[in-house]
Amino acid sequence: MNILVIGAGAVGIGLATSIASQNASVSVYARGKTAKAIRKNGIKRTGLFENIEIEDIPVYEDYDEIPENNFDYILITSKTTANENISDNLNSHKNILKQSGKIIIFQNGFGNDEPYLRYFSKSQVFCARLIMGFTRPERNISEINSFSEPILIGSLQDEDPHQLQEIADIITSSGIECEITDEVDKHLWAKMIYNCALNPLGAILDVTYGKLTENPYTIEIMDSIIDEIFEVIKSSPYETLWANADEYRDVFYSKLVPDTYNHYSSTHHDLQNKIRTEIDSLNGKVIQLGELNNVNVKTNKFIYNMIKAIESTFEN
């Protein structure tokens, strides 16, 4: 099995190392200092699971360098802000994927398959849900510091995901449980509700998830975000794992947030480093669907605008 990982951040390095440890042929698309570090030192997975080190990994810095008709899978592990660029480049280099090849998107947010569906058939594009904590202490090292539930892989386009069982089994064999699901939409929305309520607000206020649940003002904001998202889901073709917002909030405040009390969001990390966030794939997607279905999403819109206002102060 030949696999190309596009996005050499913490998630990409972690998955690439895991899969390569099971004798699959893994290549990485990376650039600049990250590409140099991987060529020099290989890639490593550390943290909760067995530490793994892979010395020789092919690295490509240009799509023109990537061999044609070579890959069974392309894993998209970049930030969602790169999807337009990546999907355009893959469209211009379609021959790097075998005719039967698949694209699997390992990202936050919802609807991340849409840029790829412009160019590839729905039978080729799949999505994964991760509830894990990855950090990158060095450019070629991924540290897994939390793991709540198995990785889930499925289709948002009603395609049979069980054809991906082989790659799910490989990931599981590396120590990270991975499963195929016919309900990936429900699980992606479950993660969306959690991320939309916590990520931007914690980033704006510079606090952990747990701190947000100790302030009546932030609780009111999060409750409103959650209410709006459930109204959006109700008005759309999608579903999630809870019948209503109240049922979700019981789990949110009693288990989900306490389990990640000391966590700072990826949005917080991005703002601290003055780089663009993934807000368009989070609250931005809620706003898009709300406007499409005539649902009032004013709290999500306010939080979205706050993040965009902060981003607008960045030089790039």
Image (cartoon, rainbow, N blue to C red):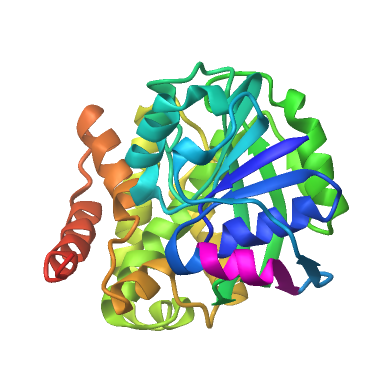
- Find residue 292 and report its horizontal and vertical position in percent: 23, 28
For image coordinates 34% across by 40% down, the residue present is 85
In the shown orientation, is residue 111 left or right of residue 151? left
Q: 69 above or below 201?
A: above
In which image quadrant can residue 68 be found?
top right
Residue 214, how many percent across, how many down?
Answer: 41, 83
Q: Position of residue 121 (x, y in %)?
A: 50, 16
**Residue located at (63% from left, 23% from top):** 69
Is residue 190 magenta-colored?
Answer: no
Quadrant in the picture for the C terminus: bottom left
**Span of residues in magenta:** 35-47
Question: On the picture, is 265 further left or further right than 312?
Answer: right
**Where 7 falls versus 199 (above or below)?**
above
The answer to whether residue 304 is seen in the rendering is yes
User: Foreground residue, 298 or 274?
Assistant: 274
Q: Is 309 situated left or right of 209 in this image?
A: left
- Residue 218 shows in the view: no
Of the pair 62 and 131, the residue shown nearer to us: 62
Magenta region includes residue 43: yes
Name the residue: 80% across, 44% down: 24
Task: Choose top left, top right, bottom left or bottom right for residue 146.
Answer: bottom right
Left or right side of 29 for 229: left
Residue at x 54% of width, y 79% of height:
261
The quarter of the image holding the N terminus is top right
12, above or below 162, in the image: below
Q: Position of residue 266 (x, y in %)?
A: 43, 68
Total marks shown come to 0
